Image (spheres, rainbow, N blue to C red):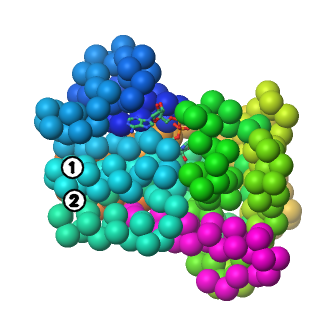
Amino acid sequence: MVRVALVGCGTMGRVHTNGYKNIDNAKLVAVCDINREKAQLLSDINGSKVYTSFDEMLKNEEFDILDVCLPTYMHKEFSLKGMDCGKHIFCEKPIALSVEDANIMIDTAKEKGLKFSVGHVLRFFPAYKSAIKTVESGKTGPIKLIRTTRNQGFPQWSWENWYNDYEKSGGPIVDLIIHDFDWIAQSFGDVDRVYAKSFNGKVENKEHCMATLRLKNGAIAHVEGSWGFPNGYPFRTTFELVGTQGQIEYDNIKNAGVEKMTCDEVYKAQYISPNLPTTEPYTAELRQFIDCVENNTPVIVTGEQAVKALKIALAAVESSQTGMPVQL
Ligand SMILES: NC(=O)c1ccc[n+]([C@@H]2O[C@H](COP(=O)([O-])OP(=O)(O)OC[C@H]3O[C@@H](n4cnc5c(N)ncnc54)[C@H](O)[C@@H]3O)[C@@H](O)[C@H]2O)c1
């Protein structure tokens, strides 16, 4: 049985806690939040011990994995403290706000022989996985055009409204569309050049951003994200992949599976899987990390891959500020 302790009992802390409930070989032994009520609410889900002091939890609890669900600007400090006590780390995305901080986290885990993974969960979403499987089967031919969107209202739920402070969250380029940057870089190849536009935090509680990527293999991608939709708008993500022999489309709120169109003989449209597997992706990502700690197998989402996504995001921020493309 792998023992887990979790710090940060906000939105993602709750999602992860629900995930552990469904992982047979994991036990969430303790949860910590400076707000006792929030920690207690998660403890009520599966009986974990409650802490309001992280240092106390580290001192008193015996566990194998520290799950860091804190605001992004705290990821490095808390992950390093956990590593100093010999804990494997699962850290929510983005890994950190700077490449320098991220590399310190990766190097420390390596020096101490600890497993370290980052919550780039898109890789565990059935629709995104299924699309990549089809591309890998060769049916679409090489993908030349990628279009993704990730749009929502402003994340007003956060503790002390930390998302609104770009020094703490990085804004939606670093916080939100980093999901798509990771998926694109890991699935379709390294990014060469980035050009982006955004409001850059100038309009309070409203932010839209768009990035154009050129991949080293010549493909181009357009990545759109927003924290500026009216409140109550459903969280919506889409993708469109266009290859030389076919295309794949997906829209999360249409609930219609992944649509594939190929021209093997004649141009034809079909749904790859009208009933996508329902494996909850956040549980799937935690399950793979638990297995990798238990069986000493390689981590699927590595720190190095998280840095790759962060570099694209930081290049997009720079481009949106200078108006110039950024070469990676
Ligand atoms: N993978 C995803 O899809 C996804 C989605 C949303 C957020 N995230 C990431 O998850 C992380 C957390 O985001 P969130 O939306 O859950 O934030 P949140 O504001 O909802 O929760 C943060 C929690 O941390 C607690 N906290 C603050 N300081 C603390 C301390 N010193 N010790 C203990 N607890 C403390 C707060 O009380 C709060 O409960 C961020 O890095 C965010 O980017 C990932």
Q: How many marks?
A: 2
Residue plotted at (82% across, 76% down):
323
Q: Crowdedness of circle 2 by 10 Å Cα count: few (<14), some, many (20+)?
A: some
Q: Which mark is residue 199?
A: none
Residue 145 in the image, given as x and y percentages of width and height: 77, 71
Q: Crowdedness of circle 1 by 10 Å Cα count: few (<14), some, many (20+)?
A: many
Residue plotted at (76% across, 32% down):
234
Name the residue that disc number 2 marks. 114
Q: Is residue 323 left or right of residue 10?
A: right
Asked where in the image residue 51 lies, by quadrant, the reply is top left
Name the residue that disc number 1 marks. 87
Q: Secondary structure at mark 1?
A: loop
Residue 267 in the image, given as x and y percentages of width and height: 86, 62
Q: Is residue 123 left or right of residue 148?
A: left
The alpha-carbon separation of the residues under discs 1 and 2 comes to: 7 Å
Q: Amino acid at mark 2?
A: Leu
Residue 187 in the image, given as x and y percentages of width and height: 57, 67
Residue 279 in the image, given as x and y percentages of width and height: 50, 36
Query: Is residue 202 visible to the viewer in this orientation of the structure?
Result: yes
The magenta region covers 302-328
Q: Amino acid at mark 1?
A: Lys
Q: Name the one closer to the observer, 190 or 43.
A: 43
